[in-house]
Image (spheres, helix red, strand yellow):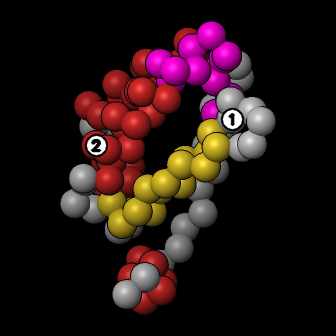
Amino acid sequence: MLATEEDLEEFQRVLKSYVDATSNHSDNLHVSIQKLPGKSCFIIYEFWQDRISWMSYLQSDASKNFQRCVIDMLEDPKLVSTMLLPASWWIMTNN
């Protein structure tokens, strides 16, 4: 997500709130943010127990509020890319 320069601080505040809510969800295995150096571009990585959990979370208040809040703070529409991995891979490599 490429945030506008004038909305950068507000975007980061809303993003932190989203990450806090997401990381506290029982089916979320991990969430992290990567900020590209020298840009106001952020990549969100989310690992979920399964696809159904993730799709369900997209309908949650936290997810919908985040999507609604950031839409006007972005330079371009956000790009969502999904890579399905077995949860056992995440659990095995992080224990």
Tell me where the magenta segment starts and ends, as one range: 1-11
Label 2 sits on a secondary structure element that is helix
- Please tell me whether residue 64 belongs to the stretch shown in magenta: no
Residue 69 drawn at (x, y percent): 43, 18
Alpha carbon distance from label 1 to label 2: 21 Å
Residue 81 drawn at (x, y percent): 63, 50
Residue 22 drawn at (x, y percent): 33, 47
Give the labeled residue for mark 2. Answer: 21
Q: Residue placed at 30% from the left, 34% from the top?
A: 62
Label 1 sits on a secondary structure element that is loop
Name the quadrant of the N terminus: top right
Left or right? Give the position of 81 relative to 51. Answer: right
* CA neighbours of label 1 inside 10 A, class few (<14), some (14 to 19), many (20+): some
Residue with the most extreme right position: 38
Q: Is residue 93 above or below residue 79?
A: below
Q: Residue placed at 47% from the left, 18% from the top?
A: 10
Name the quadrant of the C terminus: bottom left
Q: Residue placed at 48% from the left, 86% from the top?
A: 93
Give the labeled residue for mark 1. Answer: 41
